[in-house]
Image: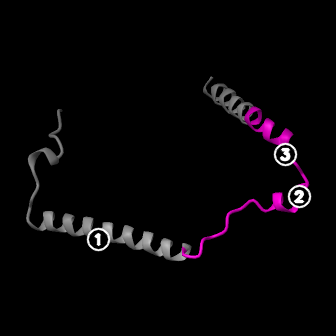
Amino acid sequence: MQISKMTARASALATGGLAAALPMLVTADEVPQYAEAANRGLGLPGDGVMIGFATVAGLLAIFVVATLGYLYRRERHLDWEFQKSDAPHH
């Protein structure tokens, strides 16, 4: 009984995926008519690498500050009762 439900769900998922992809398959062009249409990707801006490094450095700085805050709280035993897990009910 359980296997038939899973099979029905899998086939429904596959049918839905095919129905969703069908318009893309029908309207797709195999050969672009113009050379410009073939290259629609955006290029990396001149300072793109610097932006990437700044983003990574900013994320690392946020993680360092959060880690220092956690270590300070743990070292000073700044734990409140509401942060502790509840007592078992059994």
Which residue appears at 82% of the width and 61% of the height? 36
* Residue 3 vertical placement versus 60 (above, below): above
* Nearest to N terminus: mark 1 or mark 2: 2
Q: Residues within 10 Å of mark 2 (few under 14, many from 20)?
A: few
Write down the residue under mark 2.
34
Q: Which residues are magenta?
A: 18-47
In front: mark 1 or mark 2? 2
Cα–Cα gap, marks 1 and 2:
51 Å
Q: Position of residue 89 (x, y in %)?
A: 17, 33
In front: mark 2 or mark 3? 2
Write down the residue under mark 1.
64
Q: Type of residue at label 2?
A: Tyr
Cα–Cα gap, marks 3 and 1:
48 Å
57 left or right of 70 in image = right
Residue at far top of view = 1
Which residue appears at 8% of the width and 61% of the height? 77
Q: Type of residue at label 3?
A: Ala
Front in this rendered view, residue 31 or 63:
31
40 left or right of 70 in image = right
Which residue appears at 16% of the width and 48% of the height? 83
Q: Type of residue at label 1?
A: Val
Write down the residue under mark 3.
28
* Residue 37 vertical placement versus 11 (above, below): below
Q: Residues within 10 Å of mark 3 (few under 14, many from 20)?
A: few
